[in-house]
Structures are given as C-alpha cells and as structure tokens.
Amino acid sequence: MLKIDNLKVSLEEEDKQIIKGLSLSINPGEVHAIMGPNGSGKSTLSSVLAGKDGYVVNNGTVKFDGSDLLDAEVEERAALGIFLAFQYPIEIPGVGNMNFLRTALNSQRKTRGQEELNAADFLKLVRSIAKDLEISDEMMKRPVNVGASGGEKKRNEILQMCLLEPRFVILDETDSGLDVDAMKLVSRGVNNFLSSSRSFLVITHYQRLLNYIVPDFVHIMVDGRIVKTGDKKLALHVEETGYKDFLQLGKEKH
Amino acid sequence: MNHVNTSDWYDSLRRELESNSLSIEKVSRRSEYWRKSNLDIVSDFVQDTSQIDLSQLKGTCLFEPDLTVHGDIMKLGSEESKSVLSIMDVITDEESFAKNYFGRLEEKSQKLIPRPLARDNSLSPKVGYAISFSDSFKKPLVIHNRTKTSASNCFQRNLIVIKDDVEATIIETGNNLSVFNSVTEIYLGKNAKLNFLDLTGQNNIFPKISHKFCDLAENSTFNHFGLRLNTKATRTELELHLNGHGINTSIANVSLINKRDHFSDENVLINHNAYECKSRQVFKSVLENDCTSIVRGKIYVAPEAQKTDGYQSSRSLLLNDKSKFLCKPELEIYADDVICSHGSTSSSLDKESLFYLLSRGVRKDKAKEMLIAAFISEALDEIEDEDIKSALSHYIDNWTSSFFHE
C-alpha cells in the first residue's frame, strides 16, 4: 500500500536534513509503529506524508498504491485515503465543527466521484461515532477544537478518522497529553477501525500506547533513519533500556 | 441653488450654514482626515454607464425593498413605507417635524472634525427620506438605492427620529451609478433602539461617501452594521453622541475587497458624554489585489462619562503583499473610572489552519472561504437579528466563493 524508498528530507528554510535515507514498506491490514527519541524525524515523516509545506524532498520516492504520493496536493492525498491524526490538533475559531466535518466528508466523496451525504444522513452518522467516543453534543457544536481539552481534541481526531474512513492512518503521538482513560477510549476507537484493508503508522515515544494498539512491526528511528525493526517485543525492550543502544546504531549507519 | 420653494426655517438654516461653511477645512491631502483616503470621492469621477443594464444589477438587494430611492425620486412600496416622507417635501413644509432636527447634528459634527462634504449636502439636498417612528416596526424597513444619473453628484439627505421606547430596524442597500454623497441624521429617544444595516455591494462602481450622525438619549441602543463588497471607493463617517446614561452602541463593519485598487474607508467617532455607557467597534477587512482598507476609530470620553466601557477591535486579513490596511485607533479620555481598549492586527491566512482543513480533504478554495468566513464572523455576530444575520452570512459565503477563489 505505502512504499517509502530511501527518502531524504530537509527543512525548506534552513539547510538541515532531517530524514536521511528512510525506507519502509507497509501492506494492507498492517499496523506499524515508529518509536524514537526526540528530534529523530518522526513528526517530519508524518508531515511529509500528509503534504505539509516547509519541507524539501531531496531524494527518494513515496508510492501509495503504486502512484507517486509526493506529487499529490494535500487535499488529494486525503481523498486517496491518507489521514494524519495530529499531535497537536489546532483550534479554528469561527469554523463550526459540524460544518467542517460535513464539508470535509462531502469534499472527499465528491473527489472520489461519490454522491454527497445529505444533512440527515450525515447527522445520523456523526452522532453515532461521537457517542462511541463519548464526545458531547456541546463539543460538536463548538468551533473546531475551540475550548477543548487535550483529550477532547484527540478524540475529535479519532472521530474525524472514523467519519472519513481513510485507508492509511498516521497517528502522530496520539498518546501525548492523554490520561489512561482517554488513551483507552482513543485506542478502542482505533481498534474498532482496524481492518484487513487498512494500514496504520503509529508514531510514539512510549511503549504504553502499544499495549492498547498492538503493532505488527516496530521500527526504531534515530537521526532520520530506521535503525532497527522488530515486533512488539522491541517496544518492550525500549521501555526497559531506553534508546541508548540505538543511538550508537544511528552513528554507525553514517 | 434650490429649485423648489423651500420653507422659511430651511432657508434660514441654509443661510446660517452657508455663512460658516468657509471655516470648514476642505478635502485635501494635507488634511489629517483625508491624508490616506482615496480622493476619487471628491474628484469629477466619470465612468461610462451606458452599457450597464440596471435590471442585471442586484447588488446586495437580498431583502425586498419597502422603499426605492432613485437619483431624484423616491418610490414607496410596502405598507410599512407609507409613513416615510420625502425630504424634499419636508424642507418645503413650514410645520414639518423636521425643523427641530434637520441640520443640527451635521452642524454639531463640524465642531470636532471638518466634514465639508456633509455641509455641501446640507446646502443642496436632492433626494432622501424622513421618518419619524412613533411605533415599533414589526419588520425591517428596507431602503433600496437605485441611483443612475448623469449628474456628477447625487446628494441624498435622510432624517430618522425614533421616539421614546420605540424599536426599529432599517436596511439600506442597492446600487448607485453616480458619485454619491449621503447624510443621515438620527435621533434616538429614551429607551429607543435602532438597528441600521448599511449594505454596499459590488455594483457601487462609483465613489460613495455616507455620513451618519446620531444623537442618543438615555438607555437607548444603536447598532450599526456595514458591509462593503468590492466597493470602488467608499468612505463612511459615523459620529455618535451618547448623551444619557445606560446607552449601548455597536458599530461593526466587514469589508471584502479584491478588485484591483478598490477601497473602503471607515471613520468613527464615539462621544461618551454620560455615565455608564457602552460602545463596541468591530472592524474586519479581507483584502486582495492591492486593495486598501482604512479604519479610523476614536473613542472620546468626557469628564462626566464615568464607568464608560469602550472597545475597539480592527483586524485585517491580507491575501496579497500589496494590499494595505491602515488603522488609526484613538482614545481621548478625561474620566478616570473607565474601561477602554483597542486592538489592531493584520495577518495572512493562517497556514496551520489551512493545512488542517486541506488534510481532511477540504478543497483549497473552500478551505480559504471557510477561513475568511471564520475571520469575519466576529463582526457578523454583532447583528442581533438571527434571520438577518443568517441571510447575510449566506449571501457573503456565496459572494466569497465566487470572488476569492484561486
């Protein structure tokens, strides 16, 4: 589904390479976790996959279903089925949450050549997802994320995911700022959404999220590269010993 | 020169106003009040209008008119408009209610800021309406300007008197196809309330200046909302006198301008002359294609106006590098127990917000439109009537989607 080959990325505004030759292949139905210390390039990878400005791809390719993802506009990537759950979901005062959700859903449906959902069907759908995620009506009526707690914002991200039904989901440190109860709720939302045709890339610092969202593969990212790949036991190892063993591996790869 | 037989009271007033006109500073680049403005407003502006089909110009007429003001005539439409008088009839009537009001606020306004074009208007009104509300109107009175005249200037003169405890809403809209100079004098009695919406649309291809002067008695409310959609050169001068305690006022304006070198210029002076009054000013401008928006808002607080609450916010969204937002907030305060604040910002579209919307699949033009709507929503929220707000909001969204797309 997603194939990244020797990707090198630097920042647009300064001559600094963040991703230094990353390769990764993700098949339908797989859950991959990327762990790594601060500054290893994990969030840059998620931003580049979603199409955020401010980065220059110096080398490498990213194929999604065989076609070049890096050529597509941000909104086209979303319509292809790529979804980034933000580490810090932003507040957009003045844009109503419901209006935003309906516009997003119908824009994607239109791009895919599907019929737009009418107001009644949309309401029914969004309410049932909100109920599962314990998101109140009051929160749904607010402008996007305005006045929401960290946990509410993350739940809103998962609601968007469930509504838009992407095929490839990047969870960028979705566990940050969540208490145990909120993490369980968010993980339940994700686990209900798993399917043989969907893939996940879970970016996290800590192993604890992976207790709830169990990965098929765990990759350790250091200094812009994947230095070690394993199964969920690798995450447990990191939890015990930290990243120090892998920092050395990062240096050796230079 | 007037070609009608005007009343003795008007003739006497006119002589008085004419005799002290010379002391009013003229419009020029040297004047502090015109330094940054577009002087097309006072130039001999000529544009060929022969090709323009008036029936195709809907402007901002999203509300059915009760009253239509053409260049030199006024047509009454609905039942509600029957109590509206023509200003030309009023100034010929020796016993008109207007004789205690006409020209008084214009004259008072000259003491604070020179307003030479308002004086020209007082000396030669050509058309306009006079309304004295003694009962509340159930629905808004919609006034539609449809002026197409070869004359270089159309002077419209209006008078609105709202008696104690009466509420009214006036929506002024339409197209004008001539240089337009209007003066509206407004008197609000005790506990009276006026909502005034001044909707100036994209078909105002000629320069337009409107003056509104308003005297408010205790516990009255005046809400003014201005909309400027691609106006060629529009200048508004609003002056409010808060003369009794407990007065509430709100002045809000939305300027959406993306036709090259088009212009809006909003000038507000709020005089807090009494105890415990509240005034709010909210200005939002969205500018593209080297357009300019000016906001000059002053709050004056007299020594006796303790417990004044004055707020002013003026913000712009600049969609290209050469568009300009020129803002001059002023506070002049002589009382010590007051809350007065002002803030002004200019920014481009927030990249993070745009990315967030795009990353959910919202098309770029739609995302931009949503962020523009979000930006102006604070000003629209100043409109109390939900039906009017919703109609306007819908209208603006449609307009934005056709004019601000990439």
Image: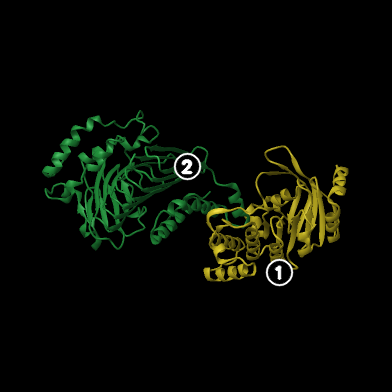
Picture residue at 87% right of the left edge, 46% below the top: A249
Kindly identify the amino acid type of the residue bearing the numbered disc 2: Gly
Residue B113: give x, y in percent of width and height. 31, 35
Q: What colour has chain A?
A: yellow
In this picture, residue B386 sits left or right of residue A88 = left
Instruction: Check disc 2 and report the residue beneath it.
Output: B343
What kind of element bears circle 1?
Answer: helix
Picture residue at 48% right of the left edge, 41% below the top: B344
Instruction: Check disc 1 and report the residue beneath it.
Output: A192
What kind of element bears circle 2?
Answer: strand
Please, is residue B30 above or below residue B316 in the view?
A: above
Asked if the residue under mark 2 is in contact with the one under mark 1, i.e. CB atoms within 8 Å, the reply is: no
* Chain with colour green in the figure: B
Which quarter shows the N terminus of chain B? Answer: top left
Same subunit, tags 1 and 2: no
Residue B99: give x, y in percent of width and height. 16, 46
